[in-house]
Image: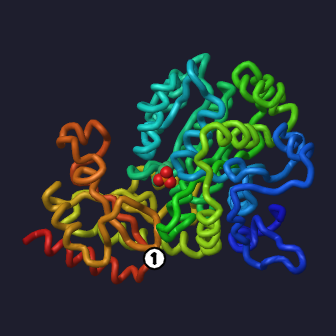
Amino acid sequence: MSNKFRRETICIQGGYTPESGEARVLPIYQSTTFKYGDSSQMGRLFDLEEDGYFYSRLANPTCDAVAAKICELEGGHAAMLTASGQAATFYAVFNIAGAGDHIVSSATIYGGSSNLFTVTMKKMGVEVTLVDPDAPEEELAKAFRPNTKAVFGETVSNPALVVLDIEKFARLAHSHGVPLIVDNTFATPINCRPFEWGADIVTHSTSKYMDGHAVSLGGCIVDSGNFDWEAHKEKFPGLTTPDESYHGLIYTKAFGKNAFITKATAQMMRDLGSSQSPHDAFLLNLGLETLHLRVPRHCENAQKVAEFLQDNENVSWVSYPGLPGDPYHKLAEKYMPDGTCGVVVFGLKGGREACVKFMDSLKLGAIVTHVADARTSVLHPASHTHRQLNDEQLVEAGVKPDLIRFSVGIENVEDIIEDIVQAMEAAKE
Ligand SMILES: *Cc1c(COP(=O)(O)O)cnc(C)c1O
């Protein structure tokens, strides 16, 4: 299907158009491998001279259909699924930045992404400079080096809820001849399409709102097809010079606008694995069919919860970009006029101890290491993900000791608020 349909229609119908007599619902191609009648055809597939499936580590029809749907939703050119959001982030960056290279990333990103950049990719020889996303453009420009290959940021960051000024970051990236990669997990293409603001590549943890039911881990990389790799040939030899593992093929010459995704599939996926299983892709597709209904309800509920918290005497502070007083409200109105996400973060008077009592007293909200699914869930980084740190170290890591990450589900919002009220009372005892 083309981009002529609106988002709601793409959520339901995108990516898969059966012919007469074929399954109405996207089938699960539960097969690692695909059969061919003659060996020379199989050879051409291996040489990337012909399109077709041969092994599900590289490509699978179910996964491709779901990737095509997400691609349409983002208004992109080509896309691929990965086994997790972490794999999507890693492949998107490693596809163009290797040992001896450097990337610039917003400091306010998902903890898993910052570990990937500052610990694991550092060991692989890729250096990262973390920047304050709110710094002025002249200041941010100083982070770039001759070997910088990409800029990375998150539309709405998990868990700090910092809204990225995508146009500013795109300008900076492009004036230094590199692409802007945006993790659009929290906003989803229902609320924001980063390509419309100049981003070049979008990544997702589909484990969150896209799946929406906390049943299936996954990731996705979408390429806008807009970045001109050939214009910055010397920076991206992996795309613009011969790949000896495919008999000297040059991705930009052979695949044009598909170069980035083809390389990520044919090379990264071939060598590193991390493909999504067709069964998980099928579940993800069911989630995507209602994304356009769930995301607005998550935002509506989160707005009401944030407003309730803002006026509550037990609360010391609350962050939600939908609140007019929030430092990111202006950017949110520009990039996400229909809403940002369903996650609200706040602190309780009484600090760490009150937070723990509050969470233990919730009846509807559950303590889980997950966000962004249909069920209301809660996490206290100081007691969970960051529990090895003392209060001082927490503040250095940008996590307030009393920060509660409250992922508002799509239950009745009155029930969610009543649960918060009773847990706050219990926390005082
Ligand atoms: C969860 C998350 C990831 C990592 O995704 P997984 O599917 O858990 O590997 C990346 N980015 C953001 C913003 C996330 O919330």
Where, quadrant-wise, is the C terminus in this rendering? Answer: bottom left
**Residue at the outermost left position:** 429
- The foreground one among 60 and 311 is 60
Q: Is residue 9 above or below residue 166?
A: below
Looking at the image, residue 242 sits to the left or right of residue 192; the answer is: right
Where, quadrant-wise, is the N terminus in this rendering? Answer: bottom right
Q: Amino acid at mark 1?
A: Ile
Tell me the SS state at disc 1. loop
Q: Is residue 42 above or below residue 120?
A: below
Residue 98 sits in quarter: top right
Q: Can residue 416 be seen at all in this image of the molecule?
A: yes
Residue, disc 1: 410
Where is residue 237 drawn, in percent x and y? 73, 23
| Number of callouts | 1
Q: Is residue 293 above or below residue 247?
A: below
Write the residue at 52% across / 68% down: 212
Where is residue 302 drawn, in percent x and y? 42, 69
Q: Can residue 330 be seen at all in this image of the molecule?
A: no
Q: Residues within 10 Å of mark 1 (few under 14, many from 20)?
A: many
Q: Is residue 64 above or below residue 373?
A: above
Looking at the image, residue 370 sits to the left or right of residue 189; the answer is: left
Write the residue at 34% across / 78% down: 416
